[in-house]
Amino acid sequence: MKKIFAIAWKDAIVRFASASELLFFIILPVVFTFLLAGGTPSGNEDNRIRLLVVDESNTAISQQILSELENSTAVRAEVATRDEAQSQFDERRAIAVFIIPAGIDIQSLQNASAEVELLQQPNNINATIAERAVLTATRSVSSAVSAAQNSVNVREAKQAFESDAEKETYFENSLETAQSLQEDAPERITVIEGTTPDTFDYDPRANSSAGQLITWVFIPLFGISTLFAYEREQGTLRRLLTTPSRKATFLLGTIFGQVAMALVQMSLLVGFGILAMKLNWGREPLALFVLLFASALAAAAFGTTMGTFIKTQGQASGLSIMFGMVFAMLGGCWYPLELFPSVIQNAVKILPTTWAMQGMLDLGLRGGGLIDILPEAGVLLGFAVIFFSVGVMRFRYE
């Protein structure tokens, strides 16, 4: 056991011999966690797309269109002057501007001469969503006017109006009826809420933070291969031949030291999330520790196996970063796996990052506990055993 601790301490000194290691150990993980997760809206914020509305008509029809937009679940309408809206659009502070020009009234809708304007930032998916919301609002108002006009035409075909005033009154009454029917229309989707009380306060920012946590822990642990390459070049491994230490002892010492440092790193990131970002990492701290410990063991064991194939520090450094990034991307740390085809979702189950991220989702998204993450933790420990065994069999001092 003393040899294992001695090897772990030696590796820690080697790893932090360069001050730049602190960049990967804590600075970059904290910065990326704050930028990518800190900007994610919490569940209590209005995350609808901001849409600037310029109402130069100021008629009953334009007010009705604005009312439809205010009730939209996709956009958050904000009234502005044309100059203000144009300025924000030019400075790219607004992704879409909806302009209702003067002259938009019932008459223009009746004779189909009404034209509105929509400014959109190019190649922006949120601008496309805003466009659809605008189309939905204008079509809703236009359909009511069309229904009222059809009612007038049917009435006029049966019996002519005695005066234009009577015709206008009939149209207004029909329009009011059409609008009332739209408001009272039954929902096309019936929402049935569960009766089981949800005692877990879900925070979507925790998902982004979990992805960054897994990413920035796996990359340095894959870097164990760099330690092996360094010691080969320095001749340290050759000198181990003169000692009674077994290969397993040396590898266990290396893994133990790197996992211990990874746990410190993860504790700092979790603490930063709790104190600085008010994140909720789940119900049970013990479950989070078990999952992160199993993840660190799997990553360290894989880095050990990499070290038995790689000979130079340059190769080890480049490949550890590359594998870390690829594993994180395919494992769901950056994008939800649901965005990928089912074939890929099944294929990436061979990666430890997939199981680590699923475990984090069990804790942060589904409100699970220790029992719920045991399958993921078990698979991660299985990865650790397999990779460590391969590392022991392939390990060479030269």
Image: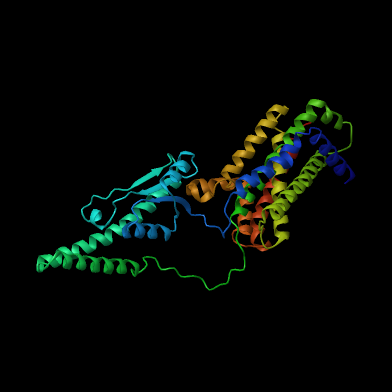
The answer to whether residue 311 of the structure is visible from this angle is: no
Count of numbered tags: 0
Residue shown at 64% from the left, 43% from the top:
32
Direction bottom: furthest residue: 195
> For residue 42, which quarter of the picture?
bottom right
Report the side of 88 relative to 136 (left or right): right
Quadrant location of residue 85? top left
The one nearer the camera, 114 or 271, is 114
Which residue: 89% across, 37% down? 244
The percent coordinates of residue 266 (x first, y second) are 72, 49
> In this view of the protein, which residue sits in the foreground, 135 or 255?
135
Left or right? Give the position of 224 relative to 67: right
Q: Which part of the image, by quadrant, shows the C terminus?
A: top right
Residue 367 position in % (x across, y down) = 62, 62
Write the residue at 17% across / 64% down.
Answer: 152
Q: Quadrant of residue 120?
A: top left
Nearer-the-camera pick, 235 or 39: 39
For residue 260, say whether it is visible.
yes
Question: In the image, is residue 239 above or below residue 48?
Answer: above
Please state which of residues 84 and 258 is positioned toward the viewer in this rendering: 84
Query: Could you tell me residue 230's position as x and y percent?
Result: 77, 29
Image coordinates for residue 392, horizontal then vertical, percent: 75, 39
